[in-house]
Amino acid sequence: MKHQPIPRLEVSHLVRDFQGQRVVDDVSIRVMPGQVTCLLGPSGCGKSTTLRIIAGVDRQDSGTLTVDGEVVSSDDIHLPPEARSVGLMFQDFALFPHLCVADNVGFGLSGSRKEKRARAHELLDRVGLLGDAGKFPHQLSGGEQQRVALARAIAPRPRVMLMDEPFSGLDNRLRDGIRDETLEVLKDEGTAVLLVTHEPEEAMRMADNIALMRGGKIVQQGAPYNVYNSPVDKAAAAFFSDINVIESTVQGALTETPFGQFLAPGVPNGGRVEIVIRPQHLRIDFDRNGQGPLPTPQDGTPARGTVQRARFMGAESLVEFRMDFDDVILRAKVPGVFMPKPGTVLWLSMRRDRCFVFPARD
Ligand SMILES: Nc1ncnc2c1ncn2[C@@H]1O[C@H](COP(=O)(O)OP(=O)(O)OP(=O)(O)O)[C@@H](O)[C@H]1O
């Protein structure tokens, strides 16, 4: 039999109710050593509660948690936080103001003072702050303090690191550097990382795996590329970017639209579907004497629309159309500067391989 690698962190069928309301609903996640999983979802969907349960500061109503195959929490077992080999990093990390940087990093370590110092210095070197070991937190910038907090969280070599929006307090320029640096250190140490965020860009940038959460449930899990390019439903698509939606009715597992026919397998006759496409996957063509481009297998049939407004957005331009059919508004995003005047008639076609057809939910 093939040997199955043991996940560093395994969360199985976690459930948590608050006042009769299910806040965490059958959540299962596995994280391998050196891998980063992002728990991504809107505010209030249960991300932090999941993290708090894994950390051991809250307890699940049912479900099991294992670290390297060893049960740390179940119906029968409940190890305290300090016995789980789980590190924590939160946005409002608090350094001890009366301790120098090296003592902050060495605080939770066991061993002699000399050993603690040595490990603290090793990590401060790793995060580029060895020269600041003797300083006090108030003498450091916000980004430097965050790196100290990172060094402190990693120092005891936790097998699992839980991070709750740890970078959201930093300004954008600082954030990218610290994010990448943090991941590098954690991957080198073989730590399994579970990071909570509500920002899809952050999740796509950092994660090996994204677990998309909504209403307490994980609705989709996978590599960032797959979650972005094969969303399970309209809301999953909309979570990652702006979307266009065209509604249509199904006959014989097909739906006719101004952009041509789309397959709608499994949807009964008369059923409503929503065709979802991202603004960057609409193609714009000029009008030639009332005609658009010829239909192609890749782009389907073009449909005519009138420009409502165009906005310059730096690397790209966003053009809003009112379509001839049904007065539907569609937005197309194109690279560079493209600023057609309002009232200009243009043709739009949809990249067929980038359209998603979902049964409409009333
Ligand atoms: N101790 C508690 N008692 C009662 N309800 C709670 C408790 N903790 C969380 N909740 C509720 O559980 C739900 C999920 O909260 P949670 O903090 O896990 O969400 P979240 O996805 O982390 O949101 P955010 O991104 O805003 O932090 C919310 O409706 C919240 O009000």
Image: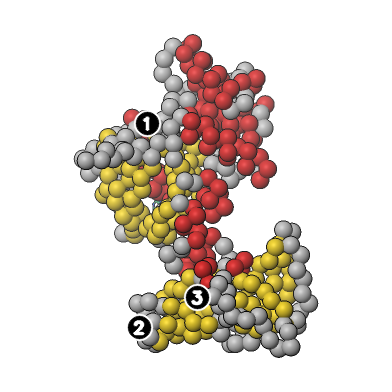
- Amino acid type of the residue that numbered disc 3 sits on in the rendered structure: Ile
Q: Position of residue 330 (x, y in %)?
A: 62, 76
Quadrant of residue 21 within the rendered picture? bottom left
Q: Nearer the viewer, residue 247 or 63?
A: 247
Q: Nearer the viewer, residue 245 or 117?
A: 245
Of the image marks 1 and 3, the number of the one nearer the N terminus: 1
**Which residue is identified by label 2?**
268
Q: Which mark is residue 85?
A: 1
- Amino acid type of the residue that numbered disc 1 sits on in the rendered structure: Ser
Asked whether mark 1 and ligand 1 are closer than 8 Å, the reply comes as: no
| Screen quadrant of the C terminus | bottom left
Determine the residue positioned at 41% across, 78% down: 264
How many numbered discs, if any? 3
Q: Is residue 317 visible?
A: yes
Describe the element under mark 2 as helix, strand or loop: loop
Q: Nearer the viewer, residue 77 or 274?
A: 274
